[in-house]
């Protein structure tokens, strides 16, 4: 039971409590032989099924060019689910029930003539299973296939009008464009076949539980929000760090993309929007996306004549790390040209020029082969107006007077998900000595159930027709608009990026970006 505003309890149904189920649909995965299908999509669909969120009759159809029977596809997917399952052992009984919904159709999606065959086979299956014909197409393919596939869906009559109760929803994986012009052109071309409400652009960061919690924590409490502005915040740091390099043959894609396109343009800017945006009038998809859009529009374009003063691109080099392991340098990685200048690290000093954030720097960074996989947003507050308390810290014979550290509020996106507030307290004793403490909320201590995977939430939302956690076309364009001049600068200059040894926190030049104003990068907390 919930309490209404008068404090009296109201009854509400389990569906309201746990969120709505989606509608029965046929889920087609284009690019079913790929890594994403096996590592993320099918395991997520399995978990939704196991936890009762996959609508009763829904069917899942893998679509790809290779010849394969339903049985072989099921066997492959069993291996995938078995190694990725977060709901414990996959029993034979469970698998048999789930696998009955898995099918495979051999279709070359680049060949428009094969869509009629696909359509007929879908209609047969839907009639046999008494499915209404509502469909989801998940484009887990190379981006260059997005448009041809949608065109072929249209010419074969597989795109219903938006008024049709047998809806179609098309999910696009990133990258959606490689710069502003290509993103605009793709959006325009797709809009000739699909209505915006039929398009779901995935940014899997938005599906992470901890990312969704940013808005709830900000706007569901009254004590923090009045402090999150230029009067109290010194600066904000956003870090998306990864320890991995070019594993699983990713080099081919990555050398075309780089850190700016691969992670900063989407995941990092989305995090920035969520920490910087104003409260929406209602907690509804478009109201939230309108507020995010205003943040992106307020982002200072930066001095284009001197981009290297506020944007630092880096690339990792071979290095020996603790334990004696030698990490390969980027230019020696599989599928990477020996002279590649592609950035594997990017750090920016950015500003959101609006009333709330005027003058507050946002330091944002992402990179591969950093010391750990850790993503966080750290809000660093200003120092108290007077230093009433200092203390002495000694290192061996060397002692120094130190000031209290400013408060920080850290949203730990991953790992060790949680929120941490650091404060100064008095160390017990006869003097006023400062002692920093952490007030900590850790998901795994508070909730023992484990966190849902981002793709579980996002796939469920597509089935529910809720696009709140997906990127709208204007948001996407605004993000590209901010990033494109930086990309053009990096790609046109005749210069290597700043090198950093693999396993370190990035190039020295990135440290100087903050040092010029007396600030420093945090060492993100990789352990509790
Ligand atoms: C993807 C990028 O979007 O995000 C990858 O293409 C990156 O390069 C990944 O590794 C990071 O996601 P997560 O959820 O592991 O932080």
Image (cartoon, grey):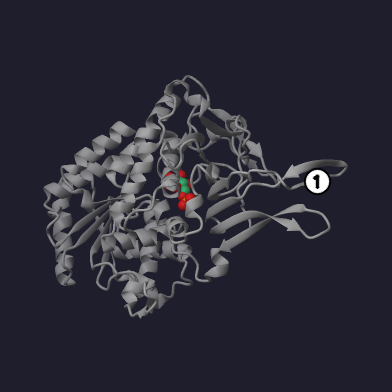
Residue 45 x, y percent position in the rendering: 35, 64
Residue 204 x, y percent position in the rendering: 40, 52
Which one is nearer the viewer's eye here, 312 or 324?
A: 312
Which quadrant is home to the N terminus?
bottom left
Which one is nearer the viewer's eye here, 151 or 32?
A: 151
Vertically, is 336 above or below 460? above
The residue at which mark 1 appears reads as 392
Which one is nearer the viewer's eye here, 354 or 364?
A: 354
Q: Is residue 471 visible from the viewing direction of this image?
A: no
Q: Which residue is rendered at x = 67% and y = 47% of the image? A: 405
User: On the picture, is 446 further left or further right than 65?
Assistant: right
Vertically, is 316 above or below 203? above
User: Quadrant of the rendered structure where residue 2 is?
Assistant: bottom left
Which quadrant is home to the C terminus?
bottom right
Q: Which residue is rendered at x = 31% and y = 78% of the image? A: 13
User: Quadrant of the rendered structure where residue 498 is?
Assistant: top right
Residue 235 x, y percent position in the rendering: 54, 41
Per the image, label 1 sits on a secondary structure element best described as: strand
Residue 328 x, y percent position in the rendering: 59, 38
Q: Which residue is rendered at x = 75% and y = 43% of the image? A: 402
Q: Is residue 489 visible from the viewing direction of this image?
A: yes
User: On the picture, is 380 further left or further right than 193?
Assistant: right
């Amino acid at each position: 039971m919930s309490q209404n505003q008068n404090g009296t309890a109201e009854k509400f149904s389990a569906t309201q409590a746990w969120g709505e189920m989606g509608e029965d649909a046929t889920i087609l995965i284009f690019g079913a032989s790929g890594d994403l299908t096996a590592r993320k999509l099918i395991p997520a669909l399995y978990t939704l099924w196991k936890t009762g969120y996959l609508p009763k009759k829904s069917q899942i159809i893998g679509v790809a060019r290779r010849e394969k029977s339903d049985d072989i596809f099921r066997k492959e997917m069993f291996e995938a689910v078995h190694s990725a399952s977060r709901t414990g052992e996959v029993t034979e009984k469970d698998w048999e029930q789930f696998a009955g919904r898995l099918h495979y159709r051999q279709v070359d999606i680049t060949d428009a003539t094969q869509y009629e065959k696909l359509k007929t086979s879908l209609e047969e299956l839907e009639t046999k299973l008494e499915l209404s014909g509502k469909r989801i197409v998940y484009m887990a393919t190379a981006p260059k296939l997005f448009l041809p596939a949608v065109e072929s869906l249209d010419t074969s009559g597989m795109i219903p009008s938006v008024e049709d109760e047998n809806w179609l929803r098309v999910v696009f994986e990133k990258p959606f464009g490689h710069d502003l012009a290509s993103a605009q052109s793709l959006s325009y071309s797709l809009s000739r076949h699909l209505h915006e409400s039929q398009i779901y652009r995935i940014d899997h960061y938005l599906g992470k539980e901890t990312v969704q919690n940013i808005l709830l924590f900000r706007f569901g409490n009254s004590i923090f929000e009045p402090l999150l502005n230029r009067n109290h915040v010194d600066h904000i740091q956003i870090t998306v760090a990864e320890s991995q390099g070019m594993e699983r043959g990713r080099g081919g894609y990555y050398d075309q993309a780089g850190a700016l396109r691969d992670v900063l343009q989407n995941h990092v800017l989305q995090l920035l929007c969520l920490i910087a945006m104003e409260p929406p009038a209602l907690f509804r998809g478009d109201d939230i996306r309108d507020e995010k859009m205003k943040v992106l529009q307020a982002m200072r374009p930066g001095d284009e004549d001197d981009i290297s003063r506020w944007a630092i691109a880096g690339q990792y080099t071979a290095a020996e790390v603790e334990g004696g392991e030698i990490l390969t340098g980027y230019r020696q990685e599989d599928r990477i040209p020996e002279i590649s200048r592609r950035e594997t690290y990017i750090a920016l000093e950015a500003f959101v020029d609006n009333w709330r954030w005027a003058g507050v720097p946002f330091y944002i960074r992402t990179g591969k082969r950093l010391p750990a996989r850790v993503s966080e947003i750290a809000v660093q507050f200003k120092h108290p107006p007077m230093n009433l308390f200092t203390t002495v810290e000694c290192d061996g014979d060397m002692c120094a007077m130190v000031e209290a550290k400013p408060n920080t509020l850290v949203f730990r996106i991953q790992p060790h998900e949680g929120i941490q507030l650091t404060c100064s307290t008095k160390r017990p004793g006869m003097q006023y000595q400062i002692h920093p403490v952490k007030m900590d909320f850790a998901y795994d201590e508070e909730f023992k159930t484990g966190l849902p995977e981002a793709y579980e939430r996002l796939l469920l939302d597509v089935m529910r027709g809720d696009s709140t956690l997906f990127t709208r076309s204007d948001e996407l364009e605004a993000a590209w608009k901010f990033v494109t001049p930086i990309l053009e600068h990096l790609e046109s200059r005749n210069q290597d990026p700043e090198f950093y040894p693999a396993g370190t926190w990035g190039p020295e030049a990135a440290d100087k970006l903050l040092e010029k104003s007396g600030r420093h990068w945090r060492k993100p907390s990789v352990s509790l």
